[in-house]
Image (cartoon, coloured by chain):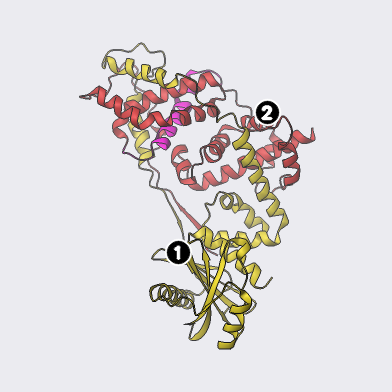
Amino acid sequence: MAQVRIVFPRGPAPETAPATAPSRREETLPLVRDQHSRARRFEQIFTPHLDAAYHFARWLTRDERNAEDVVQEACLRAFKSLDGFQGDTARAWLLAIVRNTYYTWFRRNKAADASVPLDDDTLAAGDASATLESPVGSIDRVLQQRDARRLVNAALERLPEEFREVIVLRELEDLSYKEIAAIASIPIGTVMSRLARARKLMLQHLQHTRES
Amino acid sequence: MDCTEARTRLDAYFDQELDLPNAVAIDQHLVSCPDCRASLAARSALRSSIREHADYRRDAPEGLAERVRARLGSATAAPGRKSGSRWRLPSLAQWLPAGAAAVVAAGISWTAAIQYASPSAEQVIAEQVFRGHARSIVTSHLIEVASSDQHSVKPWLSSKLDFSPPVPDLSAAGFELAGGRLDYMDNRPVAALVYRSRQHVINLFVWPGGNLGGQHVASKNGYNAVGWSRSGMTFWAISDINAAELRTFAAACANAAYP
């Protein structure tokens, strides 16, 4: 049986870059000859992905106003580092900046991230070898209830953020493991295990909901 | 593959991120494991419900693009001026390019190692399979008995060979039998069954003997091949369809040939 071999040459992770910095230093934007052409380039590249950026931020912050703040800040950051954009996937690039903005700027500057972890016992049952999640029939019954929308959103919101972000990127943005790995600065193997865990947690939560 | 092993890969399988040999192994495990099938179905139901219900597909707030534009405008209007923006963290410009570069330069490769149980023998056969496939395509010597009826193809092959190859009906899985011919592999005459999926040709080589002891995959020049043994027969399927489709073909075939 062939093994899946995962190779992940990591670049400098954004989180590890000096985030606290010379506070007295006056901020200067990179010198550019033509701000207008920069702005135009930015518009062309990133405006189509603004919705994706907003929705991703919305699921990170779980709040619409905070999501907009994160997107605005992220766009500003993206604009400033436009010269570093090599023409790769614009959406993934912007989403990565949204994510960085959320973790480095939002959480430090905006208040309390009221992360609501799932119950410890639910989390503890998350091993791949642990109990099976509920049979599909019962999940179907949950999802056919009239308040399926509320249940699904509640289950998503309750996910710890490291699981929430991968499931949002996979199921809603339809990104590949490779793209998610790049956005979240984690190895592909971690994308795989977090997705597995996230699904298990959501299914268990939906099952609990049904039973209670 | 047992359940424990299958479960560690079920999500990657579900997301179609698994390499061919692992995916084929899961395919086969699923056939005999209702628990894992249920687990897979639950993932599918979850995905559908997230896509249908998650508060996400609503459009971004009206005017977001304009507000972003305004932010950028004020940020670029006076470079060097100390900005009074309440959002701003100084120094970001310094490290952002590094972060961006990390994303851009994330040269990630997920390589699936292809291993053979007994490299020399299997590789030699795989090479013959590739050549046999290429030969059939290039020389237009694809089909000697043209029929979509397995009951016509099978007797024809049996009459010309010293064995009677299974000729599975895979139309339910979307693979139409087009016919068959004789070929020569592994130092013996073999049956070559020809299936079509859309405009693609799939050659399925079958001969008695051999025990591959699991699935073997290979790819070369844009062709994917997968080989396995069952009930004393060796099977090699090869085509230019993608690995996932060939996997589907192989699974359907393995189940239909000797149910």
Which chain is home to disc 1? B
What is the magenta segment's predominant secondary structure? helix
Residue B140, percent from left and from top: 41, 75
- Is residue A49 or residue B109 the one in the foreground? A49
Which residue, given by chain and number where applicable, does mark 1 sit on? B240
Residue drawn where x is 55% and y is 88% of the image: B160
- Is residue A127 or residue B87 the one in the foreground? B87
Mark yes or no: residue A62 visible: yes
Q: The yellow chain is which one?
A: B
Let me know if residue A134 is in the magenta part. Answer: no
The mark closer to the camera, 2 or 1, is 1
Q: Is mark 1 on a helix, strand or loop?
A: loop
Q: Which chain is red?
A: A
Question: From the viewer's perspective, is residue A187 above or below residue B248?
Answer: above
Q: Quadrant of the C terminus of chain B?
A: bottom right
Residue type at mark 2 is Arg
- Residue range in magenta is A86-112
Residue drawn where x is 52% and y is 82% of the image: B190
Residue B208, percent from left and from top: 58, 82
Residue B253, percent from left and from top: 60, 68
Q: Quadrant of the N terminus of chain B?
A: bottom right
- Is residue B124 or residue B89 the one in the foreground? B124
